[in-house]
Amino acid sequence: MEITLQVNGVRRPVDVDPRVSLLDLLRERLGLTGSKKGCDHGQCGACTVLIDGRRVLACLALAVAQEGAEITTVEGLASGERLHPLQAAFIEHDAFQCGYCTPGQLCSAVGMLAEGGPSAVTEELAGEPELTAEEIRERMSGNLCRCGAYPNIVTAIAEVGA
Amino acid sequence: MKAFEYARAADPADAVARFRPGAMYLGGGTNLVDLMRLGVAEPGALVDVSRLPLGGVEPDGDGLRIGAAVRNSELAAHPLVRERYPVLARAVLAGASGQVRNMATVAGNLLQRTRCPYFQDVSKPCNKRQPGSGCPAIGGDHANLAVLGHSRACVATHPSDMAVALAALDARVHITGPGGDRVLAMPGLHRLPGDEPHRDTRLEPGELITAVALPAPPPGASHYRKVRERASFAFALVSIAAVLDVGADGTVADCRIALGGVAHVPWRAFHAEQALRGSRAGEDAFVRAAEAEMAEAVPLPRNAYKVPLARNLIVRTLLELAP
Amino acid sequence: MNRVEGHDKVTGRATYAAEYPVEGVAYCYPVQAEIARGRIAGVDASAALAMPGVLAVLSCEEPPELGADAEPELALFQRREVAYRGQIVAAVVADSYDDARAAARAVRVAYEPEAHDVMLRADHRGLYKPDKVNPDFPTDTEKGDVAAGLAGAQVTIDVTYTTPTMHNNPMEPHATLALWNGDGDLTLYDSSQGVSLGRDMIAQALGLPRERVRVVSRHVGGGFGSKGSPRPNSVLAALAARAAGRPVKVALTRQQMFDVTGYRTPTIQRIRVGADAAGRIAALEHEVAEQSSTLVEFAEQTATATRVMYAAPALRTAHRLVRLDTATPSIMRAPGGCPGMFALESAMDELAVAVGVDPVELRVRNDPDTEPDSGLPFSSRNLVACLREGAERFGWRDRDPAPGVRRRGRWLVGTGVASSTYPARRRPSQASAAVENGGFVVRIAAADIGTGSRTALTRIAADTLHVDPGLVRVELGDSDLPYAPVAGGSMGTASWGTAVTMACQDLLRDGKQGFADTTEAVNADAELARHAFGAQFAEVRVDADTGEVRVSRMLGVFAAGRIVDATLARSQFVGGMIMGIGMALMEQSVVDLEFGGFTNHDLAQYHLPVNADIEHVEAVWFDEADGELNPMGTKGIGEIGIVGTAAAVANAVYHATGRRVRDLPITPAKLL
């Protein structure tokens, strides 16, 4: 089926098999391998991208269902050579080791910082909760990191989110 | 994944018109795409209903009407839900991850399928997936499966958190379909496995959930509590949605209790509720109520822990809600 | 300095094995055995071959030509016997991933199943004594009279601990991209912890001279041992590319990883300790039962840390192995020490309770002057310093030893401690160094699987050359580079760093280029006990009603030689402890007794710690000056972080609740 997506600001018309996930489309057809495949079942967060500004899992999104969507991947976070503040903070705070979960962590963090509302650890449902370390940890729990970079990830996000 | 045809429906009537045997409706895809990749679901066609005009969370008399396509994250963040139905907001926030909640719809959440390990593995028998093939979970890995209402054919649990809160809140599920429109009550949308574990719900083929309506919020304090094997992003071992209203005289005026992780349906604890109503709020009554509910539990060898866990969770949650 | 590849990793430019852009690539998807033991009666590929996009189906019906002495797990499609459920028995090659995967389901494999046995039991009749344990330790050791020591002891502990199967689960699934050129040379972009060994084993499996095989692995998304030697995906990609006449990609699914990429063996460990009333150990015995497959003997060195730890006049360790209808277990972070020290350090806590001695003090009291088992002097041993420093920093001093008495709201609170150790060894390696374009290039077939070795070697080279690290570029992850051992056994930096140092020294002499082969230097190492040590402290809270356990804070204090890079080291230590928290509280692969294999083979069911599980984890260290190690004075740091963690958490759970859980993981079910 023929669809057109906006990927990192570029219009990308593609002809896709309905079975193809957005993740496989990005990685295997569009040469955007920054989004990672860690589980292919929505259980690890490595494929997190932004669709219309919201963080979602590219492995569970069928490409054909994304007609017209604006997709941002890790390759689209920096402005030219200028890193997104989260990218710079991840480097500065050693918020990764193997790097495989990193693109998903970054896209997830960008989306998370733009989200409002309570989380599962928010005491008061009314109002906007403060972005404490505990809030960051809960909100970033959809992104697994087997190297155990969590403490540094939280530090990096807290610095940018403050 | 088996090849399929894909079509996007314009409105609910168009979706129903496009439905044919072997087709499935696609919402957020967080469970269906997962199951298709595993070969558990093999629809010949997908009718995409994720962008139908079925959004919106709006006041509806004393209650609330929630569009079927509302995303879980939108639902949990909605001011009316946070203010008037905090138990629902809490339940939704306890489920999955931020990314999944951004994708998953209200209807899809209700219709998600069990995470029983055998159901998800097409190389093994499963009565739910392949009627009559057997249930290896009963003699095998059932550590996180049902202790209430299960059958010899199936010991699966329903995995939703949101549905547990909706069952406690007496939600009503609005449905359209080839046979017209109708409404199913929660609890009641989901069914116990009996001899037909392949049927999770009372929906008929081609029926489409359009909205979930909540009656006026029940009086009293409410809470959702979920016990799981890690701090976040895991299905419940046992969860509870509870609403407790204690009168000025210290007796229980009203209560709602529903349990997750224990049955094929979000389990409304009617026995416990009955035992509580009119009794003096306190640990004794709460223990009696919890035991009344769990008396009918039939644990399997490796999930017996769920009985004391559910009991403790009921008692602890009610104690926290009591004035 | 920051990680040298940091920019590439945060921008998505770091290229992992399955990500190299190749024209005309095809995709291969495996078909896995649906029985745990038996024989393949026949493979019917006709339906699959008729499906769209399908290029070839591989199976034992037409065994591809392989080398005569391929490692049995790599000898694909050579035999009709099935050794375990999930073993690769066929594979489809197709134009697209979705075509290959759909067609794989259409391959019909007929089996003649036989009764299988997949359960490790302490009384299994098949248990035997292997000739050695991984990689080359004696299977059993015995010193003094253990029976007499136990009989004469004032206090004895006799307990059995069990650890479940655990899976490494690196975030990057094992993947290989294979390309043959017109001359029959093979290039593999592979997820590998060691390209030199990988190249050798793959060449051996394919029956090719090693010169015809090149393995490239510039970025690896974690391995933790599971990518230490090639897994079937590497050979499968090569065979599929040969069959299709095109480049082929094999990317295993998460579920397939549980079947064919190795795992940590389950263990059953009996520990007996006899001590005097003051807790001084008179006799210590550690007996282990564990498993391997019917294909390959892999015997984890579970009890070897017990040979190192405490001054016991009588000391016996023993390993017994049973061959089951399972996949072959393999290396997972800190093989041996990790499960073994869970048992020993839990037992030490039980001894501390039994004799009424503080657990830190008990360990100090039993600290040996020489290596207990061998009698060799230690090159350096600062366990006591780690325990003391940790106790001070953690606020251990006023700890009330009574279990189950501290309550904070709904939580029961407790603290625990455990010791850690891991061998500090090195292996022969080569490296080259050259002046190029006004800078320095160091070449070595090392691997950076996230440990930061590219950065650490850059610093080591810069230190040796007395230049700014910015002038040094390290090339690694390519088997065409000078030979290097795998990233494993906490030996990477020690082995590679020795070669890089010597190559840079050679360059300084030559002025243009340098080369080193450290074989002679390494073989000349004096016989000494070389180990890193550490101590972990944990505070946990346990929900009194539900049994949920949270680790409120964790501190690790380590003595691991000189630390090359504080940032990298902290990440390694902390990461190890976080994996240890997973081991303590949630990780287990559930064996499917009826069908074989594992039931919970994905990341929703096999729980790794998520961000919310990790509250405060801190690592500090002593900079040891140990001249008996290597030119850098380093000990490995990749594994010791995990070693004592599970025991520290379990001991804290005991302190919080009074419940001693001897069977990992400590789930709510076990505390209700």
Image (cartoon, rainbow, N blue to C red):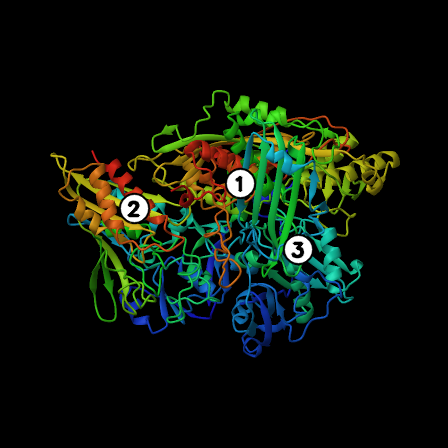
Height in image: C58 above or below B269?
A: below
Residue C483 visible, this orientation: yes
Kind of element beneath mark 2: strand
Q: Single out the residue that lies furthest toward the left.
A: B249
Residue occupied by mark 3? C190
Kind of element beneath mark 3 = strand
Q: Nearer the viewer, mark 2 or mark 1?
A: 1
Q: Amino acid at mark 3?
A: Asp
Amino acid at pointer 1 = Val
Residue C17: horizontal and vertical position, in percent?
A: 63, 54
Which one is nearer the viewer's eye here, C497 or C9?
C497
Q: Chain of mark 3?
A: C
Mark 3 vs mark 1: in front: 1
Real-space CA distance between mark 2 and mark 3, rounded to the nearest whole angstrom: 47 Å
Which sits earlier in the primary sequence, circle 3 or circle 1? 1
Mark 2 and mark 3 on one chain: no
Q: What chain letter is assigned to the residue under label 2?
A: B
Kindly report which numbered mark, 2 or 3, lies closer to the viewer in this rendering.
2
Which residue position is annotated with label 2?
A: B240
C519 relative position to A116: left or right? right
In the image, residue C378 above or below residue C293: above
Q: Which residue is mark 1?
A: C159
* Residue type, numbered disc 2: Ile
Q: Is residue C184 left or right of residue C263?
A: right
Residue C49 appears at what percent x and percent y?
58, 76
